[in-house]
Amino acid sequence: MRRRSTALGAMTAIAALVLTACGGGGGGGGGTAGTALEGTGPITLVQGKDVSGFVQGILDEWNAAHPDETVTLIELPESADAQRQQMIQNAQAQSNAFDVLVVDNVWTAEFAANRYIVELPEDQFPVDDMLPPVIDSARYLDKLYAVPNSSDGGMLYYRTDLLEAAGITAPPTTWAELGEQCAAIQATPQGAGVACYAGQFEKYEGLTVNFAEVVNGAGGVITEDDGTPNVNTPEARAGLDFLVNGFASGEIPAEAITYKEEEGRRAFMEGRLIFQRQWPYQYSLANATDGSSSVAGNFAVAPLPGLDGPGVSSLGGHALGISTFSQNKATALEFIKFYTTLENSQKYLELASQAPIYTSIYDDPALQTEFPYLPVLKESILTAVPRPKVVRYGDATLAIQDAAYGALTGEMTSEEALTQLQTQLEALTTN
């Protein structure tokens, strides 16, 4: 299987598409836009919905020690696309309402190139202690524009009790094995009526991730190292066909076309799935013993399967950047230092099952005992393939979603979808 090791900090062939936003001004209630990290006072932390409940506790700790520089949490919708849109709208209005932005790692190039966020002093952060792919994802043109607070790698969640009931001793490593194991499990009394597999297939950023993973898992790419689109290939078709055929055969339940992370999490925790592609945040929630999960103690995680062997995760994760239009950048910088410490990264793991950013956490034997998925997660992140790192990422991900969703819903064949996507991506890199 072909694996990619693209350095996220490298400049791609589409650097010519860099767009620069206008500086200065104060529309939308904003002040003067500057890049100097000056100004102290209250700030806001802007992110998607805090489903873990962890974030406010960290803010309370900071606020107790900094009564004149308090941080207020602004929660945006669960959808990554909606979060990105609102952050961009705030920046385009040159509003100072948003100070610290929690950005998806794939937005770094776009936000930096358009001057929505400012460059950060890399020498003030322990970047050498962080997983290389994670810190690389926060750079643009070899400069640091955000500091990771969590990483992410896709893993295969599976029901250990159902595998055991069917006499299966190990989770699948290939898509063919996944189908065979589902058939064997569904033939048992314990597995009857339980759906085989699901990921995130609603038409949003999660579909881009799932599409990228199956393409990479079959040895294909979306773009080459230099940014050249190369998605209309037999390898990419094999990956997309895994999902298309899964929906057509019922191996993937029809309702999964509406799944984002949370819909899939609920399905797995309610015992409606044998296998699921999901991020690590689900682990602690699914193991809860308060009655909210019917699968607590009866699941484990493994690497994602691929066409001919273990598959490949897309690199996920989030980082904290400072809005160009923040009036209190000095406070924002100090808050980011506080939020992204080794200690808080470990708390993020312990309280929210978020993937840590520091190598030492993954290698701690005590933590590996407490969180047995850490070795799987570390390997997932270190071997992950980034989604296309392009300045016009918003346009690229929409093109990917349109093509993939069209194929999954039967509106077009896999070949038609990939032909369309190749054409659209070529237009984005040449116009």
Image (spheres, rainbow, N blue to C red):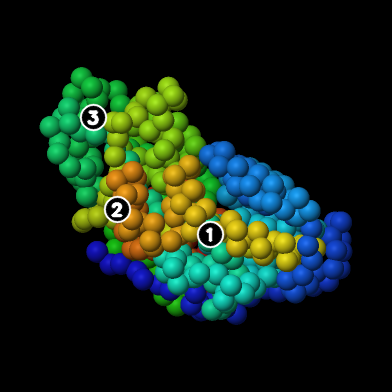
Residue 6 location, x and y as percent? 40, 72
Dot 2 alpha-carbon crowd within 10 angstroms: few under 14, some 14 to 19, many 20 or more: few
Provide residue 256's location: percent of width, then percent of height: 43, 36
Q: Nearer the viewer, mark 2 or mark 3?
A: 2
Residue beneath label 3, please? 161
| Disc nearer the start of the sequence (2/3) | 3
Is 101 in front, or is 92?
A: 101
Say which amino acid is labelled 1: Thr
Q: Nearer the viewer, residue 201 or 100?
A: 100
> Left of 302 or right of it: where is 35?
right
Q: Secondary structure at mark 2?
A: helix
Q: Which residue is mark 2?
A: 365
- Kindly report the distance in space between the C-alpha atoms of the residues bearing marks 2 and 3: 26 Å
Find numbered disc 1 in the image and state the secondary structure of the residue it sits on. loop
The residue labelled by disc 1 is 341
Q: Quadrant of the N terminus?
A: bottom left
**Residue 185, disc:** none
Q: Quadrant of the C terminus?
A: bottom right
**Residue 103 quadrant:** bottom right
